[in-house]
Amino acid sequence: MNKRIGVIGIIVEDRDSVENVNKLLSLHGDIIVGRMGIPYKEKNLSVISIIVDGTTDDIGSLTGRLGRLKGVSVKSALTQK
């Protein structure tokens, strides 16, 4: 399968989900190129940006599993090729 490069934006509004988010990111560490996380204390949430390089199946698996977590919103953008 062809690999694609993309960015995944994650907003964590439920602090109880932070541990599960980190576990999923570790499980998919082989496709993660870089990560930036910013706690937004005034709004009581965290914003995480992930750069990925993997197949659409691998990236979809990660985003799908993240999106099923309570209080977690996920969006992704991938290259066309």
Image (cartoon, rainbow, N blue to C red):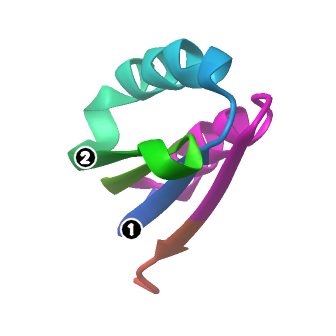
Position of 44 compared to 72: left or right? Answer: left
Position of 66 compared to 41: left or right? Answer: right
Q: Is residue 5 visible to us here?
A: yes
Mark 2 residue element: strand
- Where residue 16 appears, x then y in whole percent? 65, 15
The residue under label 1 is: 6
User: Which amino acid type is shown beneath numbered disc 2?
Assistant: Arg
- Where residue 7 appears, x then y in whole percent? 40, 65
In this view, 33 is above or below 56: above
User: Which amino acid type is shown beneath numbered disc 1?
Assistant: Gly
Q: Earlier in the sequence, mark 1 or mark 2?
A: 1
Q: Is residue 70 magenta?
A: yes
Residue at x 48% of width, y 49% of height: 42
The magenta region covers: 54-75
Task: Give the crowd class for mark 1: few <14, some 14-19, many >=20 residues within 10 Å.
Answer: some
Position of 78 compared to 39: left or right? Answer: right
Position of 43 compared to 31: left or right? Answer: right
Q: Is residue 42 magenta?
A: no
How far is mark 1 from mark 2, CA to CA?
12 Å
Quarter of image, res 81: bottom left
Comparing 27 with 46, the one in front is 46
Instruction: Report the disc number at residue 35.
Output: 2
Comparing 46 with 74, the one in front is 46
